[in-house]
Amino acid sequence: MIWTLTIECDSGRFLAHECIRVIELKSDASLLDLHDAIQDAVGFDRDHLFEFFAGRHRRNRELVYADTFDSEDAFDAYANISLEKVFPLPSKCRLFYHFDFGDDWYFKIKKSRKKPFEPTPGVKYPRAIERIGPNPEQYPNSE
């Protein structure tokens, strides 16, 4: 089945504009797949550690999905956690993606209430289906 997720950049060191992406991906995709989809959707370089957690807000971590201090273990752990295991989230919790622990890019991830659907033949998932605002500049002074 294909799920629709809304990814909103909540904060980051260089965040200057609203950035929301709506993506479609397979329900059995892993958190590692979701990491890649978010990186592609906002044009980032995949060059830092990251984590996924659930909580009422980004300063509250009620559920952490992997130990991110060992990147090898985190990649393996995230590759083995499917979205079907993550959703539904605990009551009143949101899913967060935290990328680059220095520049602190935080993204809120919301699963759409839209009914899951069968993959469309010939369509490659994941894919961004809506973009609000420009991509954040990961390194604005690197030009």
Image: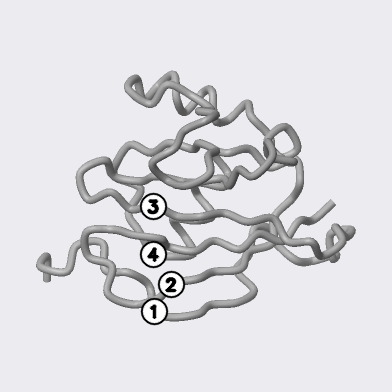
Tags 2 and 1 in contact by the CB under 8 Å rule? yes
Q: Is residue 103 left or right of residue 50?
A: left
Q: Amino acid at mark 2?
A: Cys
Q: Which residue is mark 2?
A: 19
Instruction: Please state the horizontal and vertical placement of residue 39, each as a whole percent of the image.
Output: 44, 55
Instruction: Please state the horizontal and vertical placement of residue 46, each as a whole percent of the image.
Output: 35, 48
Q: Which residue is mark 3?
A: 106
Label 4 to label 2, Cα distance in Å? 12 Å
Residue shown at the point (58%, 47%) measured from the top left: 94
In which quadrant of the rendered image does the C terminus lie? Answer: bottom left
Label 2 to label 1, Cα distance in Å? 6 Å
Instruction: Pick whichever of labels 3 and 1 is earlier in the sequence.
Output: 3
Compared to residue 39, the image places residue 55 above or below, namely above
Label 4 secondary element: loop
Instruction: Please state the horizontal and vertical placement of residue 87, each as a whole percent of the image.
Output: 72, 40
Tags 4 and 2 in contact by the CB under 8 Å rule? no
Observer-nearest of 134 and 45: 134
Instruction: Pick whichever of labels 4 and 2 is earlier in the sequence.
Output: 2
Label 3 to label 1, Cα distance in Å? 16 Å
Q: Which residue is mark 4?
A: 43
In this rendering, the label closer to the viewer, 1 or 4: 1
Neighbours of disc 1 within 10 Å: few (<14), some (14-19), many (20+): some
Instruction: Answer with the quarter of the image where residue 49 lies.
Output: top left
Residue shown at the point (34%, 59%) measured from the top left: 11
Neighbours of disc 4 within 10 Å: few (<14), some (14-19), many (20+): some
Label 2 secondary element: loop
Instruction: Pick whichever of labels 2 and 1 is earlier in the sequence.
Output: 2
